[in-house]
Amino acid sequence: MTQRFSCHSPADGSLVAERAFATSAELDTALDQARLAQRAWAATPLAERLTRLTALVDWVVMHKTTLAEELTAQMGRPIRYAPGEIGGFEVRGRTMIELAPEALADVRPPEQAGYTRFIRRAPLGVVLVMAPWNYPWLTSVNAVIPALAAGNAVILKHARQTPLVAERFAQAGREAGLPDGLLTALHLDHDLAAAAITDPRLDYVAFTGSVDGGHAVRSAAAKRFIATGLELGGKDPAYVRADADLKQAVDGIVDGAFFNSGQSCCGIERVYVHESLFDDFVEQSAALVRSYVLGDPREPETTLGPVVRTSAAKAIVAQIEGAIAAGARPLIDAKAFGERTLPYLAPQVLVDVDHTMDVMREETFGPVVGIMSVPDDETALTLMNDSRYGLTASIWTRDEEAALTLGPRIETGTVFMNRCDYLDPYLAWTGVKDSGRGATLSLLGYEGLTRPQSFHLRLGRS
């Protein structure tokens, strides 16, 4: 009997979609079709490939309103912000299309008489893209568009909470005229996903998700000599130096901590503030958080929606309560946000926190931030690096030279100055430690999706 799964909206628990998991036979067919389609696609001129991918992006943008409404229903992002994810999809997609000719160009060494020599960036074959629910369009476009541009085929698997995104992505491919089998959406359970990774017809896995999920992917991939790209989340810090623009820091950090109900791998989860600004920063941050409107994400006035599910909300509450029991002081009265039931969760700002508490060490993935006072740069650096994660870190200062001096000493994939929770598609998106391995976006994002093939041609005698 075919197993099924359901997607229920965190807004009201209503059924959004019910789908059957793919069967082994369906996976087998998809892999065969992908291999066949990929060979012809790789032989297609790059300019034509990019024209089709541009049409794919155009289709998604054209249906922005519908796709945003579906996104809100599936994972609870307030509707006032949901269209922004489609906007981000467009920027990233078009940027990776723009970068493709340079990223995929042959590498040519100095000329040598009598020889033609170059390195070609050949496609890998079939790429499995596994995307999460929190930013399902943004995380998947990072890999899907460059994988296809490079001449690969893609099998796309989204989290169970956002199945419609995978289906819509594949639909966009069909509407853009991609060959049959080149971009296939499959709803895979854990066992079948592992089976796909171990299948010799698959050549690469791009995974965005939890650390545990990343370990599972690596464990399956270890049975074969294939590479993986892993983006696994974070516990991202912000440091407010004594010379920071206070309002800029408050506005940016609060948004970075609470946007999408804090459900962002690069969201701010811990803040270190120079002692000279600490009291003012805390007071202004708490006041700004109190202005949020917690409510039904389908209502235009809502600025803070529910977290994705009740079990997630309970885990966040447990982390908050654990910190309070250990001495942390909450600054936000949850009752001020009305009588709400989980997964609706009031935002929280905690002070008197330290690194013995999970709220400052383990990923929270919710609308909570802890704030500590620090006396100097060295203390801030020590605390920022005291984490098993390393995705992004932000420094808030008026001194660019200070940021450039401190930045290289932070164990992180991206260093921000006076901004956070943002991806620039011209820069590599990468992490260190338990935040993952590999890179997406930028010119470097193509490297993991291709392999070098050297050509050394000796010319015949005339």
Image (cartoon, rainbow, N blue to C red):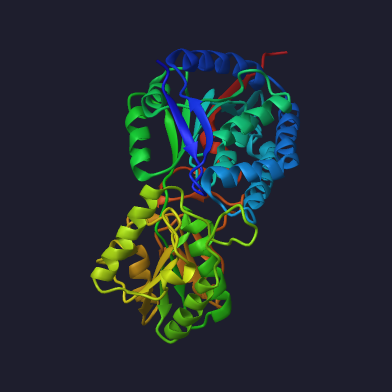
Q: What is the quadrant of residue 461 in the picture?
A: top right
Give how far across and how far down residue 206 sits, in percent. 48, 35
Furthest residue in direction bottom, as rendered: 276
In percent of the image, x 47 and y 85: which residue is there? 280
**Is residue 237 rendered to the left or right of residue 400?**
left
Give how far across and how far down residue 6 sits, in percent. 47, 33
* Residue 196 visible (yes or no): yes
Give how far across and how far down residue 126 sits, in percent. 53, 23
**Is residue 341 rendered to the left or right of residue 30?**
left
Could you say which is closer to the camera, residue 12 or residue 426?
Answer: 12
Above or below, 162 against 342 in this view is above
Furthest residue in direction front, as rendered: 339
Could you say which is closer to the camera, residue 451 or residue 306?
Answer: 306
Above or below, 120 against 91 in this view is above
- Quadrant of the image for the N terminus? top left
Above or below, 142 against 343 in this view is above
